[in-house]
Amino acid sequence: MTIKIAGAPCSWGVDDPKNPYLPPWERVLQEASQAGYKGIELGPYGYIPMDIKRVQSELSKNNLSIIAGTIFDDLVRESNMENLLHQVDDICSLITKLPPSSQENGQHFSTPYLVLIDWGHEERDYNAGHPDKAKRLSALDWNNMMAHIRTLAERAWTKYGVRSVIHPHAGGYIEFEDEIKKLLQDIPYDTAGLCLDTGHLYYSKMDPVQWLRDCADRLDYVHFKDIDLDIYQQVMGEHIRFFDACGKGVMCPIGQGIIDYDSINRTLKEINYHGYITIEQERDPRNSDTSLRDVSQSIAYLKSVGY
């Protein structure tokens, strides 16, 4: 097993590029480098500018490469497709012109990836983590979303050579066990891979170890998070949006929560996973002054248990 650990701007509270409290992207890159990362995700579309010279200068200054770009948007609505295709072009144009990250032997596809996340549905956001309460898409809307994902993934691959990976995400329409299983039936692996997130799996009532094992043949990329069990149990009893739960501290530094990273390490070795793992710890950006401390603790913990 050859694994490289990377980071993501969401550990600095960067999820909504319109949030007025976001830290400057240059500071995020600087602190990611200080923490010891060699790679980082681009973050949500619109945060890091689509300016190759500026981005390359900051990456070079901090000895970082870009591991992935992300579309974090409504993948269901037909009327959003023009916007989504524009994002594919902008993101892939940028990440393919930056110096590439190193590839690991046994990695299925080369980084940088395009991470596809469905997001933007209030009725699902308030029921994140509640498979028994959350409404599901109609068959027509589900099939439309699958068609949209195929179109986006094929454009990224055929036009730019960028591999798309689908990320089940708490608060979106690809979140729960039944939805992930249906996704795997409807999207062939030659179209897009899977990005499983340990924190989102646990948040949405699934066992991360079991899902990593069961999806080994579809797994291109992995996100690591940890969950504070006391806060998780509290927010599960509240009518609360997912990122408001994160603002309360439901995500904590890795090794300080409920997720068993010793078992995950053994599982990744068993399934012969190679490539990148990205640490995330969603938070309120007004608390980003503790981000460097927290991501440094997460990295130190993972190294201490054999990653």
Image: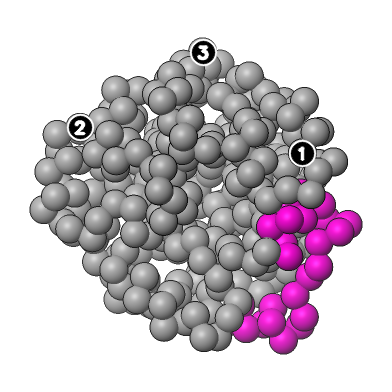
Q: Residue 94: x percent and y percent? A: 24, 61
Q: Where is 101 relative to 299, above or below?
A: below
Q: Residue 258: x percent and y percent? A: 72, 25
Amino acid type for the residue under numbered disc 3: Ser
- Residue 296 figure quarter: top left
Which contiguous range is marked in magenta? Answer: 123-147
Q: Nearer the viewer, mark 3 or mark 1?
A: 1
Residue 110 visible in the displayed image: no
Residue at (60, 77) in percent of width and height: 76
**What residue did someone put label 1 on?**
235
Amino acid type for the residue under numbered disc 1: Val
Q: Where is 158 relative to 110, above or below?
A: below
Amino acid type for the residue under numbered disc 2: Asn
First in sequence, mark 3 or 1: give its number.
1
Q: How many marks?
A: 3
Q: Are marks 2 and 1 in contact (CB under 8 Å)?
A: no
**What residue did someone put label 3 on?**
304
Residue 125 visible in the displayed image: yes
Q: Left or right: 78 with respect to 262? A: left
First in sequence, mark 2 or 1: give its number.
2
Q: Are marks 3 and 2 in contact (CB under 8 Å)?
A: no
The answer for how far apart the CA atoms under marks 3 and 1 are is 30 Å
86 or 283, which lies in front? 283
Residue furthest right in the image: 132
Mark 2 crowdedness (10 Å alpha carbons): few <14, some 14-19, many ≥20: some
Q: Are marks 3 and 1 in contact (CB under 8 Å)?
A: no
Q: Which structural element holds mark 2?
A: loop
